[in-house]
Amino acid sequence: MEAKVKSPSKPKMDDTYIKPISDWSVYKQRPLVISGPCSAETEEQVMETARILAATGRCDVFRAGVWKPRTKPGGFEGVGSVALKWMKRVSLEYGLPVAVEVANQKHVYEALKYGIDILWIGARTTTNPFSIQEIADTLKGVDVTVLVKNPVNPDLNLWIGAIERINKVGINRIGAIHRGFSCYENELYRNTPKWQIPVELRRRMPGVPVITDPSHMSGRLDYLGEISQKAMDLNFDGLMIESHIDPEKAWSDSKQQIHPGSLVSLLDELEIKRNAPASLGFSDTIEELRDQIDIFDDQLMEILGQRFKLAGQIGSKKKKLKMKPLQNDRKEQVIARAVERGKEKGLGAEFVREIFEIIHRESLNRQIRKMRSE
């Protein structure tokens, strides 16, 4: 599918102007599946991965990184434009639409020259409105699909702003990729999901399909299924899952890639709540609202775990300083502060005091256990 140039048209400026995913030629059934290696390494690797994925019948779009911006210099940064020839060959031989990441004007020109069907904008690029505008200006008058990853840090307005910049130049086939967020306190995932952010994106831009990237969120295979299932529970529209014919020997991000033959098993284990394709309009059904409550419950558990971990560290400090575990002044200070903050959020004083009495009791018990064990 060649990218076609057309006369630019002025887009409508509202929340429903973006074509829904059901209008995309690559769409088959929910979830839309985008898969392929983190990096295009060799022509043989790309073609063999694509061959297996095409044979599964479960891959809607073939992806591969051509230019690979790394956090630090010295790592593998992609083979460059030569890989675009391989991607075009995948499209011609296996009939799969192909997708690559672009980060600047040159990347866009090269990708369009080889008829790449879908361009995605990476998390690092999304953080920079100057870079987004450069890409948008380059895409003016072009008929191509663009997917925008969330910025590295949890900034919803920055994410929305990037989507709007792309749409303003006449690109209507736009989707969002949720790949998680870099957070200092994260311990479980490579990138913390912060599910409430893509949920809010769907509420504010109901015409934008959301595709979850469990590979970059998990950073390893353990959580691919769990994250993919959560995306389906939230009625998101697709999954981008990295696959490689020999993951252990991958030149980049080897721990988060699965063998393409394993993709079917992962997808078969997912429970899809709705058989029909997802409606992109935000739906306030009880089921979806409960799914959102689960997000906040998970966050509560994560925050409590971090709080009690700090309480244990305080226990160690108190033992060294020969302090008593219970400090009543500090307890009352914490509860009074919580009550005031609770009022700002519409929470009753008794409710907040009761919760923090329980939290303080558990923190005290952890401090005592820590002091006795050392």
Image: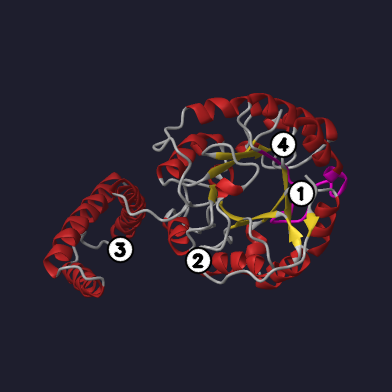
Question: In the rendered view of the protein, which quadrant contains the N terminus?
Answer: top right
Of the two numbered discs 3 and 2 on the same chain, state the one appearing first in sequence. Answer: 2
| Circles 1 and 3 in contact, beta carbons < 8 Å | no
Determine if the magenta segment contains residue 264. no
Q: At which x and y percent is residue 321?
A: 30, 63
Of the two numbered discs 2 and 1 on the same chain, state the one appearing first in sequence. Answer: 2
Which residue is label 4 attached to? 96
Name above or below for residue 16 compared with residue 270. Answer: below
- Measured Cα–Cα span from mark 2 to mark 1: 40 Å
Q: In front: 39, or 368? A: 39
Q: Report the predominant secondary structure element of the magenta stretch.
A: loop
Amino acid carrying mark 4 in the image:
Leu
Name above or below for residue 274 compared with residue 360. Answer: above
Please give the range of residues in magenta: 61-84
Quarter of the figure with residue 130: bottom right
- Measured Cα–Cα span from mark 1 to mark 3: 46 Å
Which residue is label 1 attached to? 75
Which residue is label 3 attached to? 321
Quarter of the figure with residue 259: top right
- Measured Cα–Cα span from mark 3 to mark 4: 66 Å
Q: Residues within 10 Å of mark 1 (few under 14, many from 20)?
A: few
